[in-house]
Image: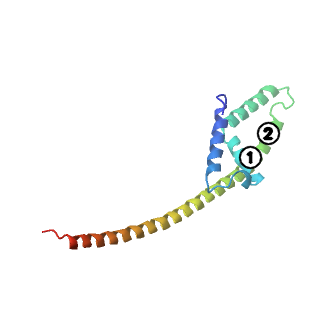
Amino acid sequence: MTTHSHPLTILGRIRRNRWERHPGIRSGRQLTLGERAADRVRLIMGSWPFVITFLVVLGAWIAGNGRHGFDPYPYILLNLVLSCLAGLQASVLLISARRSDQVASELALHDYQTDQSAAVAIAALRSEVSDLSVQLARIEALVKRRHPTP
């Protein structure tokens, strides 16, 4: 990683890498094209750079089209573009929300499996500790019989 990397790019890599390293989450080539696209779009559309860029473009459109541009006030073409964008954005948000739910489900399943294996391991440890306690009690009894205290 270079010292000139953009902070949001680094944050995006950290987020992706955290998921990719988790054993309960499918990632990389395991994902479908649509799932990978939903993850990328969520990272882009849910960021401040997207919002700021959108506001700059919107302001430039309004400033450039005042009364004599290709889309003069009341900006009918801009309204059409914004309506289409809102429709597409709603669909993309639903797709990425579904992907987030899927990731949460995979995490929950992994956590449940981990808890189950931990419960089995704890039960085995309890059994071993119990066996060791019985053996220790037997050894203590033998020692007391051989070396009684006055």
- Which disc is residue 79 wearing? 2
Q: Is residue 35 left or right of residue 80?
A: left
Which image quarter is the C terminus in?
Answer: bottom left
Residue 51 horizontal/vertical position (percent): 69, 36
Is residue 90 in view?
Answer: no
- Which disc is residue 55 wearing? none
Which circle, 2 or 1, is nearer the viewer? Answer: 1
Q: Is residue 125 left or right of residue 47?
A: left
Callout 2 secondary element: helix
Q: Amino acid at mark 2?
A: Asn
Residue 103 horizontal/vertical position (percent): 64, 55
Q: How many marks?
A: 2
Q: Which residue is rendered at x = 64% and y = 28% of the image?
A: 3
Is residue 9 in view?
Answer: yes
The correct choice, above or below, for 13 with respect to 111 in the image is above
Q: Which residue is rendered at x = 63% and y = 39% of the image?
A: 11
Here the colouring is: rainbow
Other-residue count near label 2 (Cα within 10 Å), few / some / many at <14 / 14–19 / ≥20: few
